[in-house]
Image (tube, rainbow, N blue to C red):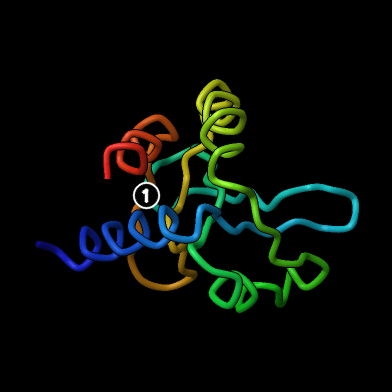
């Protein structure tokens, strides 16, 4: 199993256990979405399985963002379809350097639900 697949499996297990995902949100309620490293012209929303991992990215251009949790049930029921409609990928355990899986929202939701 590749390192990326192992990281994705660990992410899925962690979010199912904690029943939440973490992303970066500013005081205006805006969420971080950035350019995909894998797919030309695509946007990706970085998400993490815990607050500590997310907080590491509240620097530089994202210094005015904070780690914010999204309950897993809400994420699956409300967010996934909107992200899918907007064509936004999800970057599980997102990294600035190195590989992290960038997945279609529906694909990630299926992995989480079927775990």
Circle count: 1
At x 55%, y 38%, the residue is 73
Q: Where is residue 51 in the image (x, y as percent from the top left)?
A: 60, 71
Q: Is residue 16 above or below residue 1?
A: above
- Dividing the picture into quarters, in which one does residue 112 lie? top left
At x 53%, y 68%, the residue is 50
Instruction: Name the quadrant of the N terminus.
Output: bottom left
Q: Position of residue 6 (x, y in %)?
A: 21, 64
Is 83 placed left or right of 8 in the picture? right
Is 38 placed left or right of 25 in the picture? left
- Dividing the picture into quarters, in which one does residue 37 lie? bottom left
- Dividing the picture into quarters, in which one does residue 25 lie? bottom right
Q: How crowded is mark 1: few (under 14 residues within 10 Å), some or many (20 or more)?
A: some
Q: Where is residue 109 in the image (x, y as percent from the top left)?
A: 40, 36
Q: Where is residue 103 in the image (x, y as percent from the top left)?
A: 37, 42
Residue most extreme to the top: 85
At x 54%, y 45%, the residue is 72
Instruction: Name the quadrant of the C terminus.
Output: top left
Given residues 79 and 39, the one toward you in this image is: 79
Q: In this view, does 110 lie above or below 51?
A: above
Given residues 99 and 106, the one toward you in this image is: 106
In what element is the residue under mark 1? loop
Q: Mark 1 points at which residue?
A: 38
Residue most extreme to the left: 1
Given residues 19 and 33, the one toward you in this image is: 19
């Amino acid at each position: 199993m590749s390192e990326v697949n192992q990281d994705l499996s660990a992410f899925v297990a962690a979010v199912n256990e904690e029943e939440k995902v973490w992303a970066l949100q500013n005081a205006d309620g805006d969420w971080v979405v950035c350019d995909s490293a894998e797919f030309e012209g695509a946007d990706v929303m970085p998400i993490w399985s815990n607050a500590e991992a997310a907080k590491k990215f509240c620097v530089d251009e994202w210094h005015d963002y904070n780690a914010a949790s999204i309950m897993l049930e809400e994420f699956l029921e409300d967010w996934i379809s909107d992200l899918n409609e907007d064509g936004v990928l999800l970057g599980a355990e997102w990294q600035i350097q190195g590989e992290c899986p960038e997945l279609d929202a529906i694909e990630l939701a299926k992995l989480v639900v079927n775990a």
